[in-house]
Image: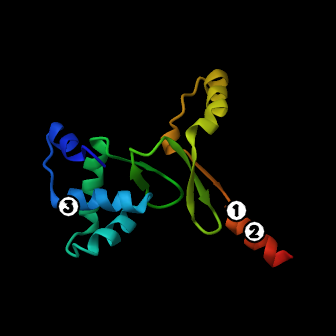
Amino acid sequence: MQGWEERLRSQGYRVTEQRADVLAAVLNLGHGTPEEILARVQVDSPRVNLSTIYRTLEVLEEVGLVTHAHLGHGSPTYHSVDEDLHIHLVCRSCGAIDSAPAVIAEPFCAALERDHGFSTDLGHMAIHGVCHACREDAAASRG
């Protein structure tokens, strides 16, 4: 992610190794919970703890480098804001997370605005269902 150091500095934050490590873990994972990010960071920095991960994610989110969504019960899932705006697709069978372009939801969002005066935040939207692979596995086991 280009320019992340300048974004931190311009908002009064120092560039630290831990911030770099956490951002790299988020980018590498694509979508990751704080616990998953911690596991990735601890490969190279075993002394980092979960509270450091949460504090660092808070700073990275404040400066606009990462964002989060609640994809189910438990910890939020973080991802880079450099990704195109997308809707999270969460498989309730295997837990896989995929994404679909947010543009696919524009008619739905327009209807919510028109009929209910409700403005949506698609960056936090998660749709739960069953992924293609799990549906195929289920069909194969029935067949």
| Among the two numbered marks 3 and 2 on one chain, the one whose residue lies closer to the N terminus | 3
Does residue 32 appear anywhere in the picture?
no
**Is the C-beta separation of discs 1 and 2 under 8 Å?**
yes
Please report the residue visible at 28 percent of the width from the left and 68 percent of the height from the top. 41
Residue 73 image position (x, y, % from top left): 52, 60
Q: In the rendered image, which quarter is residue 11 located in?
A: top left
Please report the residue visible at 41 percent of the width from the left and 52 percent of the height from the top. 79
Please report the residue visible at 28 percent of the width from the left and 48 percent of the height from the top. 60
Residue for badge 2: 136
Residue 70 image position (x, y, % from top left): 49, 52
**Viewer-nearest of discs 1 and 3:** 1
Is residue 67 rendered to the left or right of residue 20? right
**Helix, strand, or loop for circle 3?**
helix
Tell me the number on the disc at residue 18: 3
How far apart are the alpha carbons under marks 1 and 2? 6 Å
| Among the two numbered marks 1 and 3 on one chain, the one whose residue lies closer to the N terminus | 3
Tell me the number on the disc at residue 132: 1
Q: In the rendered image, which quarter is residue 53 located in?
A: bottom left
**Helix, strand, or loop for circle 1?**
helix
Residue 19 image position (x, y, % from top left): 22, 56
**Is the C-beta separation of discs 3 and 2 under 8 Å?**
no
**Helix, strand, or loop for circle 2?**
helix
How far apart are the alpha carbons under marks 1 and 3? 37 Å
Amino acid bearing label 3: Gln
